[in-house]
Image: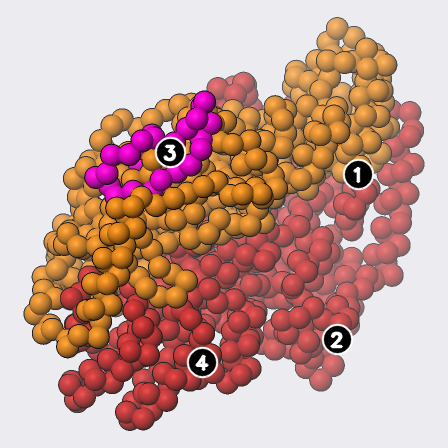
Chain colours: A orange, B red
Amino acid sequence: MTANALFVDLYEIAMLRAYFELGMAERRATFGLFVRRLPPARNFLLACGLADVLKELQELRFEEGDLRYLSSLGFGREFLDWLARFRFTGDIRALPEGTPFFANEPILEVTAPIGEAQIVETLILNQIGLQTILASKAARMVFAARGRAVVDFGARRAQGFDAAVKGARAFHIAGVAATSDLAAGRAHDIAVAGTMAHSFVEACPSEADAFEAYARIFPGATLLVDTYDTLEGVRKIVALAKEMGADFDVHAIRLDSGDLDALSRQARRILDEAGLSRVEIVASGGLDEALIDRLAAAHAPIDAFGVGTEMAASTDAPALDIAYKLVEFAGAGRMKLSPGKRNLPGRKQIFRQFHDGVALRDVIAREDERYSGVPLLEPAMRDGELVKPRPRLADIREHARAAMAALPSDARGLSPCAAPFPVTISMRLAEYEREVEASLTRKTPRARPHLTRCA
Amino acid sequence: MTANALFVDLYEIAMLRAYFELGMAERRATFGLFVRRLPPARNFLLACGLADVLKELQELRFEEGDLRYLSSLGFGREFLDWLARFRFTGDIRALPEGTPFFANEPILEVTAPIGEAQIVETLILNQIGLQTILASKAARMVFAARGRAVVDFGARRAQGFDAAVKGARAFHIAGVAATSDLAAGRAHDIAVAGTMAHSFVEACPSEADAFEAYARIFPGATLLVDTYDTLEGVRKIVALAKEMGADFDVHAIRLDSGDLDALSRQARRILDEAGLSRVEIVASGGLDEALIDRLAAAHAPIDAFGVGTEMAASTDAPALDIAYKLVEFAGAGRMKLSPGKRNLPGRKQIFRQFHDGVALRDVIAREDERYSGVPLLEPAMRDGELVKPRPRLADIREHARAAMAALPSDARGLSPCAAPFPVTISMRLAEYEREVEASLTRKTPRARPHLTRCA
């Protein structure tokens, strides 16, 4: 699902016009994307959404209809003619998708003529925000499940089509096994999974009829047993196995309500006693990571968790305090001083330091510093062109797995870490921050220079 | 932003195939859409999303690529040939957009051949869920603002493109004055608004330069004054007014951080003392309905509130417990008996009863009952065709305004009502529920009828 060049806030186009009229539109600026605070129940965030941002930037064009609309808002011919030729020609450095990161760390930096860098703000915040939120939430589900499969049942509860389809990809990157949504399965070539709904059971003359029909039509089906009475439903599976004999190829049963711990144990016993140990148990119905954790920790005999609402909308943290801020203009550092909204000036790099394969700390440094540790931001786009081929989704997923596995174990826990992962600032960056701040506070009270200096 | 026929869960297509193979696909069923529980901080929900659902259903087609993908999943030629000719031919009755509703009330009912009614489940849940969540949240912002304008700044924090663009329309229906997002402004022909960003101030040699440039380029501009020091920023507006004289046409200043109550009063005083009473004050920065309520109740001199994250993602209630359930099949009532997941059987109508123009109670009745009060569900689609022309957005907004104004005043408050709005069930519906339940519980333990009865 792609945007349109008009997926911008009016003020971005207004500022672009102002830069155009002031002759500033071509002066180079760097904007940095970062999250001010992690949500309370997140020990890290998992970067996601870069692929879509790069694709959107490559395709960014103002079409005839867009320009007509802008004209109706009062934008003039000369500016619109210039917009008609507009292309994104900037450079992007970013965390590869699937990289864990922390508060105040640069996720992505755009260096471009300021007008270009400015009008991609809403697009970048929206897409990296959305996909990072969803990948980060899914990672918690996967940790909680302790190796059991987590399946995405969330398309119906996601906030719109875009969130559902891109969410399935973000969940896959975080380690989710499959999605129920076919549009997502097709778009991203990821595994799809599905069972049956209560309505099918209700539409058939009896539950047993429904099970038999489904089992005969779909070898390897998962049958939903809780429409009327869960354990009665399980006994009908046993009866069906006897009736079908060698033709019986039901892969799993699904429990969707009630006490999933108790029911899974009772169902397991009924199945095992009937020689159906190979029939797996899928649990669903209002699951979140805390419930999955409790079931998995108690060794409830559940083989897979179907997760909907809580993951699809990241209900406990549905938005990030994510910001896209000017950090450099025409070679000089820039920062906001507004209370609670300061940001680190200049282009930056993150160095992640390890001991015995475990991440020890991150150091945020100036971009040109050489520091010990692994530099995390990588060039992604230069002069509007991709620097390297788009990575394969399987490789992104593997990168995420390895990078999360290298975090200290408490960062992978569901509870807030006793001590947050240490993120420090290099001496040179701290010095630079003081310099930029001093230059800005000196400038503010000074006599106002004449406007032409702005151009 | 439209979906694709593959925006379905695998199990819906699997069930469709099962109905097809069992010869049941053409038997008529009714599914009902409802919300099981209101979120804790909602006294009602505002129905939204019907227009997009109707549009999607009219356009629902399985294209060549969709069929190839389904073939790759193992669906057979005969079924796919049938899917290629698939059209939605059902009937829809629904609450008009902008109608307030409560838990367990039918929002929409689909009556169609069961296969058709089944495969639109994910689409309907996703779109009506999303848009209802966002309209309902926005209504709270509008109530809190007590007549001051609320402006949507949320595209950057919405969960994806679809949520941002459709959200702006939902906010408009709930009474929001304008959106910052141009894609939404263009798509829905709603007012757009915008100010300036901190980055513009930072890119200019000084804040005063930035103000002057913007004020000269954009008559009627709103200038952001908190980049360095808010009150210093306001004083620069005063200086600019002196300098520009009759050319000064700044519409408003924007405060985006700090103590908005105190700063708005101080800014107002500075502006008024300089004879700039006509310059308005816009406040933004992490606003939610509670903060807006506090500022408005304290008579802080704020003329408009720019709201982002909290409204765009409905952060306190980002998902609904919304369900789409079979309520009738081949003329007989159907319901689930799963614990905590029961639903009312059969086709229904809601009658809203008023006294002196104030809504007193709702009665959920069987569809063919005649009851006192205003029937809320209206025919929207018959045999897959629209029953009436799509209502104008302005009319939907006016309907929402009037219908919300007719609710008891505590339902429009931000706190949970002491007594929730009374929703009752007609005697006939209650009786019918007992009958259907009895027929289902009788059926379940009975000897299983032979499978051919299913077809």
The secondary structure type at the circle numbered 4 is helix
**Of discs 2 and 4, which sits in the foreground?**
4
The chain letter under disc 3 is A
Mark found first going from the N terminus, 3 or 1: 1
Q: Find residue B360 and name its label.
A: 2
Which one is in front in this view, the residue at disc 1 or the one at disc 2? 1
Which image quadrant is residue B219 in? bottom left
Query: Disc 3 marks which amino acid?
Result: Arg
Label 1 vs label 4, nearer the camera: 4
| A357 magenta-colored | yes
Q: What is the span of residues highlighted in magenta in the rendered image?
A: A353-377
Q: Nearer the viewer, residue A91 or B258?
A: B258
Q: Name the residue at 15% across, 75% down.
A: A448
Q: Which chain carries label 1?
A: A
Q: Report x, y in % for residue B384.
A: 55, 47
Seen in the image, is A95 located left or right of residue A200?
left
Do the residues under discs 4 and 3 have CB atoms within 8 angstroms?
no
Badge number at residue B223: none
Q: Residue at x 49, y 31 (%)?
A: A407
Identity of the amino acid at label 1? Gly
Question: Can you tell which mark lies on residue A258?
Answer: 1
Residue A127, by quadrant, is: top left
The N terminus of chain A is located in which quarter? top left
Mark 4 — on which chain does it sit? Answer: B
Marks 1/4 same chain: no
Residue type for callout 2: Leu
Position of B11 relative to B451 (above/below): below
Give the CA distance from mark 4 to mark 3.
43 Å
Residue that carries the numbered disc 4 in the rendered image: B262
Residue at the image position 74 percent from the left and 81 percent from the top: B355
